[in-house]
């Protein structure tokens, strides 16, 4: 199987671009995820994408959405991906299918099942037998569905992506791993192109350079960067040298940027998440970007052209206009080659540092002229001054022969058009612009005024009718007559919005959710080992705290509500980072109880915190009593730079040197009769710690701890010399484990079943005050609605989980909370037709008095 031609697939990839059944295509593709939408909305969302002018959707297939527990598969209801693919086919959309096994997508565990971490010998995303055996079970389920619906079989699937952004991950044998995935795809009859996307531009890192696996690129630039074009052109050239097109499988959503990518040589442009959705239930991931421990919200929305509730944003019109430009230029554009402008281009506004152009296949160039500023300006293109709107990127045509459009003047040339060409016939050209348009046709130059919506501007030059449409009209353009008449689709009817209304009836249940007993354990087990892959669990024990000033909690994740002797501690959301807990005011034998909730498994491999490593498990971790604390900041011997023999003795970090940034090693013996924890205070940048002759580990500012077994150990700390980095201190905590834990499990199924149940309730009026650690189950009456509701919770110090129609909607955190990403973090969405609403409200310590003040119902179209 060669890179350039995929045999018997109908899909051909080469340096000129993408051909489908021999027809060259530039493909616009929108991410649309069946698992983030109610099944009832699949068709409407697919039709919405098709109406935007995009011809394709890319869709992840999350492994752990279909394998609910080991060997328990589901492809029914909202999990019926075959039905979704069939709907895409009926709608007239192509599909790029992305079955992983790892998908990222800010989804629970990146779609890797949580129980994989229970096998200590299994190594995720590696060429390793245990992991590949699990992947085989998944591929055996999903690849036949794709094979039956790929393009050669009359289905919509034109490409299948293996893995996802593997160049971000430390895979030891990329070639072996991707070869194994490729071979499984071929075994299951996949004949369309197999692709693998590079998340940070490392083509070999994403594909292992495996024959038959086509590299694609993900670009997430700063939309205002002037340097986008030069980077993208480099990748277009690299791939052309391999006989391949540049396919951008993920990028930003803004069409100004997408135009720049198109002009830089991209044949596939797939902005990530143009059509937004929802993280239902316990499916969001945790720890996504920036500060470790970032939570993903119930809403999954990054500002794409369709909101989570299906509302069309202004970018939707921009999508329609760009799609019409691509359609109007047809094969000229699809077979174009990446270049730079052959004419001089200057501007009086911020623009690209290296503008891109495309050499069109039948002559002439398309030149992108981005205005990266907020004010209108003028560009000079080949000596002609033209208007450019703010925050825009017109695709200007230069020296384009018009004969291929069937014009009577077969030798006519479009010397310059300063606006997007959205349609052409044998007697007319139609452009889209909201500023005046300059056209040079042959030896005649005209400037056509900016049109008003619904009132196209027309002029005739050398027998050719030139029409300029406002972008809102160009997006609805259906046909252009040879005399310049235009036919527009009906403007979409905007649904009215209703003002927020308060919920009128709330009933509090007088009974609590049960838990499944999960045994007695010496040390706290992981939730996954108790069969809780999504949900929560409780841990209870009794411990003597006389003479103990503090506890140390190590490895707790995700959300821990801890009660010690009846005193509720502030919620812990440290994702495994060691937590010191002051218990000086607690004495005697006291009960300890912890409720641990899984927000979501890490979707990205973040080494800074233990629970943010890919495949890391959830649970309480280990709780220790601290029996002694010693300062160990002195008496370290120094090795490296010019330190000689005998090694000098200094305080940790105290060596003075002119060699700033050069590594230096501090070593000393650390004795302890018990298990101990070495705490490095003041870590600024990562340091390497070696215990005895073991493998070095990296200690970060986010979790500056190293556990040591009982005994005397030689500890070495290696770090770059950083005299302005502040003082580094070391202390040793002698530990004893807290043991004898009884556990209870409340998995997603149990909680969802309880939410759907009935029992005695009493009507209440809001506000509802709770004590820290107290929970209330509320049944909420909702009025009928054809559109569903956004339910906004106002209050302080509470977490809430919602259920409707037998499914967990999602969770929100009201009041002071960790960082959240995604959509609005303060609302739950009840889709149209989903009956009933049940809320689990939990009070949180340390964030003001826990209180649910109001529940407001908002229109999803507001």
Image (spheres, helix red, strand yellow):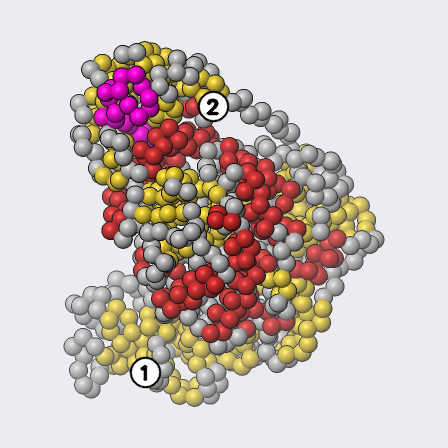
State the residue lying farthest toward the front.
Answer: 8
Q: Which residue is mark 1?
A: 668
Q: Residue 208 versus residue 528: which sits nearer the camera?
A: 208
Q: Residue 253 versus residue 206: which sits nearer the camera?
A: 206
Q: Residue 167 versus residue 149: which sits nearer the camera?
A: 149
The percent coordinates of residue 511 (x first, y second) are 79, 58
- Report whether 740 appears left or right of 615: right
The percent coordinates of residue 774 (x first, y second) are 69, 58
Q: Quadrant of the C terminus?
A: top right
- Report whether 737 appears left or right of 762: left
The percent coordinates of residue 84 (x first, y second) are 58, 46
**Relative vertical location of residue 303 with respect to residue 631 in this rendering, above or below:** above
Q: Is residue 644 visible?
A: yes
Residue occupying the point 24% across, 74% down:
664
Residue occupying the point 20% across, 21% down:
384
Q: Which mark is residue 478?
A: 2
The percent coordinates of residue 23 (x first, y second) are 38, 39
Q: What segment carries the magenta color?
A: 390-413
Q: Please say if the residues under marks 1 and 2 sit with CB atoms less than 8 Å apart.
A: no
Quarter of the view holding residue 21: top left
Q: Is residue 812 visible?
A: no
Q: CA distance from mark 1 to mark 2?
A: 78 Å
| Secondary structure found at label 2 | strand
Residue occupying the point 63% across, 69% down:
531
| Secondary structure found at label 1 | strand
Q: Is residue 259 magenta?
A: no
N-terminal of the pair, mark 1 or mark 2, is 2
Residue occupying the point 63% across, 79% down:
521
């Amino acid at each position: 199987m060669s890179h350039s031609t995929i045999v018997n697939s109908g899909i051909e990839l080469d340096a000129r671009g993408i051909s489908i059944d021999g027809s060259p295509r530039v493909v616009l593709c929108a991410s649309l995820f069946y698992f983030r939408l109610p099944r009832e909305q699949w068709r409407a969302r697919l039709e919405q994408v098709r109406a935007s002018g995009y011809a394709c959707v890319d869709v992840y297939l999350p492994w752990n959405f279909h394998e609910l527990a080991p060997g328990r598969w589901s492809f029914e209801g909202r999990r019926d991906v075959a039905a979704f693919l069939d709907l895409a086919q009926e709608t007239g959309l192509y599909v790029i299918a992305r079955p992983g096994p790892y998908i990222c997508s800010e989804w629970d565990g990146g779609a890797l099942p949580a129980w994989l971490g229970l096998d200590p010998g299994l190594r995720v995303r590696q060429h390793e037998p245990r992991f590949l055996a699990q992947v085989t079970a998944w591929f055996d389920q999903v690849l036949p569905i794709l094979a039956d619906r790929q393009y050669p079989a009359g289905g919509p699937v034109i490409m299948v992506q293996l893995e996802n952004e593997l160049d971000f991950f430390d895979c030891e044998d990329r070639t072996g791993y991707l070869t194994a995935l490729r071979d499984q795809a071929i075994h299951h009859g996949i004949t369309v192109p197999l692709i693998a996307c590079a998340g940070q531009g490392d083509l070999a890192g994403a594909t292992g350079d495996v024959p038959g696996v086509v590299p694609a690129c993900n670009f997430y630039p700063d939309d205002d960067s002037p340097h986008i074009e030069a980077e993208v052109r480099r990748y277009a050239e690299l791939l052309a040298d391999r006989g391949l097109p540049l396919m951008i499988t993920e990028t930003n959503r803004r069409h100004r940027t997408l135009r720049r990518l198109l002009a830089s040589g991209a044949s596939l442009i797939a902005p990530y998440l143009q059509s937004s959705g929802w993280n239902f239930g316990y499916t969001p991931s945790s720890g996504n970007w920036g500060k470790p421990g970032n939570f993903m919200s119930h809403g999954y929305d990054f500002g794409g052209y369709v909101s989570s509730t299906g509302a069309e944003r202004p970018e939707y019109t921009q999508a329609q206009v760009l799609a019409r430009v691509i359609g109007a230029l047809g094969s000229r554009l699809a077979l174009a080659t990446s270049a730079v402008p052959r004419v001089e281009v200057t501007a009086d506004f911020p623009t690209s540092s290296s503008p891109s152009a495309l050499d069109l296949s039948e002559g002439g160039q398309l030149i992108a002229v981005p205005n990266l500023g907020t004010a209108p300006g003028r560009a000079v293109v080949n000596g002609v001054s033209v208007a450019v709107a703010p925050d825009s990127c017109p695709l200007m045509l230069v020296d384009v022969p018009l004969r291929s459009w069937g014009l009577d003047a077969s030798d006519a040339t479009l010397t310059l058009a300063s606006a997007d060409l959205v349609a052409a016939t044998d007697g007319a050209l139609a452009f889209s612009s909201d500023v005046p348009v300059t056209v040079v046709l042959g030896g005649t130059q005209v400037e056509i005024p900016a049109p008003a919506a619904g009132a196209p501007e027309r002029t005739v030059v050398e027998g050719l009718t030139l029409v300029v449409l406002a972008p809102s009209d160009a997006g609805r353009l259906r046909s252009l007559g040879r005399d310049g008449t235009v036919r527009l689709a009906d403007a979409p009817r905007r649904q009215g919005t209703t003002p927020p209304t308060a919920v009128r009836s709330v009933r509090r249940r007088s009974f609590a959710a049960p838990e499944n007993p999960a045994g007695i354990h010496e040390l706290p087990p992981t939730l996954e080992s108790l069969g809780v892959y999504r949900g929560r669990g409780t841990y209870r024990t009794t411990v003597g705290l006389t003479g103990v000033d503090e506890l140390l909690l190590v490895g707790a994740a995700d959300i821990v509500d801890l009660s010690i002797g009846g005193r509720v501690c502030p919620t812990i959301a440290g994702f495994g980072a060691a937590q010191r807990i002051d218990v000086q005011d607690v004495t005697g034998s006291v009960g300890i109880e912890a409720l641990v909730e899984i927000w979501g498994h890490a979707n990205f491999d973040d080494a800074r915190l233990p629970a943010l490593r890919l495949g890391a498990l959830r649970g309480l971790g280990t709780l220790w009593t601290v029996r002694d604390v010693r300062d160990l900041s002195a008496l370290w011997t120094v090795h490296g730079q010019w330190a000689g023999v005998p090694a000098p003795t200094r305080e940790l970090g105290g060596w003075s040197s002119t060699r700033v940034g050069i590594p230096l090693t501090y070593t000393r013996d650390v004795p302890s009769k018990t298990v101990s924890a070495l705490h490095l205070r003041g870590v600024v940048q990562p340091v390497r710690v070696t215990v005895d002759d073991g493998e070095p580990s990296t200690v970060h500012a986010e979790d500056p701890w190293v556990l040591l077994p009982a005994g005397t150990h030689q500890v070495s700390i290696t770090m770059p010399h950083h005299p302005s980095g502040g003082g580094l201190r070391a202390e040793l905590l002698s530990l004893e484990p807290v043991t004898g834990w009884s556990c209870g499990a409340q998995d997603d199924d149990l909680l969802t079943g309880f939410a759907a149940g009935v029992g005695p309730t009493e009507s209440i009026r809001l506000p509802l005050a709770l004590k820290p650690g107290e929970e209330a189950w509320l049944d909420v009456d909702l009025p009928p609605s054809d559109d569903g509701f956004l339910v906004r919770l106002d209050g302080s110090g509470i977490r809430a989980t919602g259920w409707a129609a037998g499914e967990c909607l999602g969770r929100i955190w009201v009041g002071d909370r960790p960082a959240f990403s995604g959509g609005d973090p303060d609302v739950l969405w009840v889709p149209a037709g989903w009956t009933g609403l049940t809320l689990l409200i939990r009070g949180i310590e340390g964030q003001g008095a826990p209180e649910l003040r109001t529940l407001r119902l908002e229109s999803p179209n507001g």
